[in-house]
Image (spheres, rainbow, N blue to C red):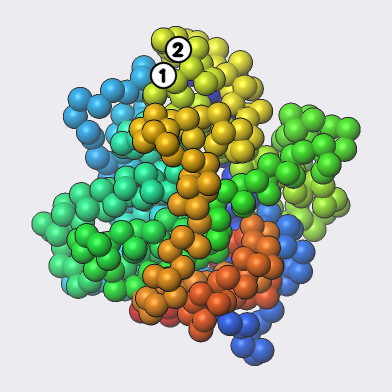
Amino acid sequence: MKKAFMGLEKRILFLFLILLIPLLCMVRPVAAETVQFPIADPYKATIFGTPPELMYKLKEPTKPDECEIVIEDRNIPDIFWYNEKFYYSTAMQEEEAPLLFIIAGTGSEHDSTKMRFLTQLFHEAGFHVVALSSPTHMNFVVSFSKYGAPGYVPHDVEDLYRAIKWIKADLERDYEIRNISITGYSLGALHSAFLAKLDEERKDFRFRRVLMLNPPVSLYTSALRFDSWLSPENLGNKTPRQVIDDLIEAFSEIYVHSDIVDLDDNFLYALSQHTDFSDMDMKAIIAAAFRMSSSSMIFSSDVCLNAGYVVPVNKQLGVGDNLMPYTRVAAAITFNDYVDEYLLPYLQFLKPGSTKGELVRNCDLGSIKEYLSKSDKIFVLGNEDDIILNSADVDFLRETFGDRAILFPRGGHCGNMMFKPYALKAQELLR
């Protein structure tokens, strides 16, 4: 039922707020004079982010406009009546300016906390800005995706390319655009790299600059890391569902019995100072947020494709149906299971003979390493201690991008994105 489903979304939002509030980091070890990010634990940095006093202060925040695209005659399941339109944000300059597209990370919407910050940050730097949801977000899956099965980078990039092309054409009617650049964080950063490669072939945008913020090297291996953090080896005698329920309960308890109104940076940073989380807890929080996001993605894809993976084939869900049984099923699906049981069979249906090896390679920066190593317009801004990277991944970024890879020593995954030195470096790299 819609009410139950919204309950899941709220939980996802809750965990996302916990995870995605912070942000900022940098290629080559950052200069010694740079202020050190204060949180040394990468898991804690990922969850709690930048201390408020160290955040970049936006000078004159603008109010982005929410825009929409409606694809006529698109089949929208009744249960998703509120996602008929594809939403994105714009923050435009009055005068001629360069245009920048920003792509959100896994499961994030165009106006999430990180996306709002980046929109403001780059608008302040003089860009026309367009913020796009991740192809893994429900709204994207339901209202815009051609294939409807997110997580396969070539297909997701095809969808993003089409969205950017349509939006660019629309904006050109009313605004003077000097040139076009693209950026994104986390999975959105990986998408940015593949979009740049695709545009080299099609030449619709001729991106002037591409900035990858905290990219994974391999979508598959990074996602498997999250799967492992919800495994018995990390959780002990608890099940993933018990850990998730316990954590949500604990955060809710703190929230209810405090004077804080918003789950903002101040709340989370204060929480980090008063709560003793174990490594298992922090890994479980991060992995649970990813799992919640992927479960929403799987559910929406399954319903849209009528695939029968979570919801029985031909079961027509209405706004009054109880969705909790389906959300529980979706939340128990690991990313590896999603690939093996859903995504790969779907790709093999579209292209017989497709293999898992091909799927994994096509979602890995290694597959376009030669292009990335030679394209001097592409930059990486990240952290040496990013929890979605191992030492080989960090070496890959340094070897591939050379001086175009700027890595801060601390910050976890996007935990220092709002840290002033990281924000200023991001602006500098796109100018």
Q: Badge 2: few (under 14), some or many (20 or more) residues near its Cα, within 10 Å?
A: few
Please give the name of the residue rendered at 49% of the width and 35% of the height, measured from the top-left corner: 344
SS for dot 2: loop
Task: Give 56 or 297, whichever is nearer the viewer.
Answer: 297
- The disc label shown at residue 313, or none: 2
Image quadrant of residue 129? bottom left
Of the pair 15 and 165, the residue shown nearer to us: 165
Question: Residue shown at 84%/32% (left/top)?
Answer: 238
Q: Position of residue 176 (x, y in %)?
A: 15, 67
Report which residue position mark 1 lands on: 306
Mark 2–mark 1 CB contact (< 8 Å) = yes
- Image height of 362 relative to 230, above or below: below
Return the residue found at the far right. Answer: 237
Q: Is residue 148 left or right of residue 310?
A: left
Of the pair 169 and 59, the residue shown nearer to us: 169
Vertical position of residue 393 compared to residue 78: above or below: below
CA–CA distance in space, label 2 to label 1 = 6 Å
Q: Decide: few, some or many residues near mark 1? Use Cα within 10 Å; few <14, some 14-19, many ≥20.
A: some
Vertical placement of 253 versus 103: above or below?
above
